[in-house]
């Protein structure tokens, strides 16, 4: 086939999508507490301010997220659960769901796909946001497993013959946004909510040493962390001419 007849007929590949309007409902899925805030905190805060209902799912319990050998895993789980609650409140999210899989041991399974399908059908989001499982050299296995389960859950949720025992109507989200993409093609302006993103991240104080350069320890370290985020947001927005942005790969399922 040549000319217009040669276009790919799969919906995922067809044409350039329309600009993304503020959605009514969003489901954001992260492997660990703080993943969502790093990947999409500014975008979620912006949409929450515009009235979007936001559900957050955290897949693992965060029990390995420390370099301090004196902390018991159970105490860390409790701390990270509370930190996620506070961060979600800062962002304006409506609900936080913890799946409590063991941190660092997450595997892609049919059961995990089924769980994602069920949550998508229950929350019925217009937009789903998560990790990009196609990212080259994505080291963390939990991020890869979460991204695959979300993508496959989206496909299952849209087709009624998957998991009829759930007794839930099929649901097709209009858009999937994947953060940390190698080839982003969607950009959300977060200039007005950058400070909210920072405030939500700083709620995760147990992660200050591991991911924020000790931002919880001293003012100069906090300043360095914020500066690093500002430079990151500027880099993310540069292809779209936005001073501070979060970038995503956009998929129409």
Image (cartoon, rainbow, N blue to C red):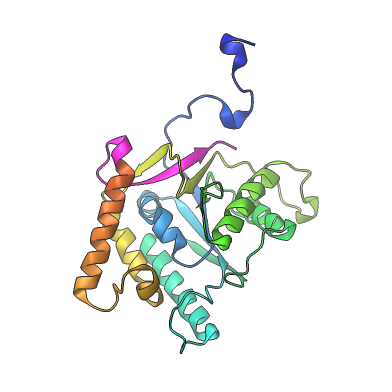
Which quadrant holds residue 59? bottom right
As drawn, 105 above or below 179: below
Q: Residue 14, how many percent across, how many down?
A: 56, 25
Left-right relation of 168 to 39:
right
Q: Residue 57, how many percent across, how many down?
A: 55, 61
Is 190 magenta? The answer is no
Q: Is residue 34 visible?
A: yes
As drawn, 60 above or below 125: below
Left-right relation of 72 to 245:
right
Left-right relation of 109 to 151:
right
Range shown magenta: 238-253
Residue for point 42% across, 42% down: 22
Residue for point 41% across, 53% down: 40
Residue for point 50% across, 85% down: 75
Q: Residue 205, how many percent across, how many down?
A: 36, 75
Pick whichever, 183 or 114, lies toward us. Answer: 183
Is 243 magenta? The answer is yes
As drawn, 194 above or below 18: below
As drawn, 218 above or below 15: below
Q: Quadrant of the N terminus?
A: top right
Residue for point 35% across, 73% down: 208
Left-right relation of 152 to 129:
right
């Amino acid at each position: 086939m040549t000319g217009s007849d040669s276009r790919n007929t799969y919906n995922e590949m067809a044409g350039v999508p329309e600009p993304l309007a503020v959605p009514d409902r969003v489901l954001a899925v992260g492997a660990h507490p703080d993943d969502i805030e790093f990947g999409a905190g500014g975008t979620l805060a912006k949409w929450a301010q515009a009235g979007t209902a936001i559900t957050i799912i955290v897949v693992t319990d965060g029990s390995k997220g420390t370099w301090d050998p004196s902390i018991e895993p159970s105490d860390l789980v409790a701390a990270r659960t509370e930190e996620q609650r506070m961060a979600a409140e800062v962002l304006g999210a409506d609900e936080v769901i913890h799946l409590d899989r063991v941190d660092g041991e997450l595997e892609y399974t049919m059961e995990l796909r089924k769980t994602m399908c069920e949550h998508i059908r229950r929350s019925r989001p217009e937009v789903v946001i998560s990790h990009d499982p196609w990212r080259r050299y994505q080291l963390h296995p939990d991020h890869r497993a979460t991204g695959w389960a979300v993508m496959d859950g989206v496909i299952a949720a849209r087709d009624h013959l998957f998991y009829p025992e759930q007794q839930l109507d099929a649901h097709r989200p209009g858009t999937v946004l994947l953060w940390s993409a190698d080839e982003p093609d969607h950009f959300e302006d977060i200039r007005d909510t950058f400070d909210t993103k920072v405030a939500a991240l700083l709620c995760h104080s147990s992660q200050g040493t591991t991911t924020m350069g000790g931002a919880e320890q001293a003012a100069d370290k906090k300043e360095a962390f914020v500066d690093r985020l500002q430079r990151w947001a500027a880099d993310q927005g540069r292809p779209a001419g936005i001073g501070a942005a979060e970038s995503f790969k956009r998929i129409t399922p």
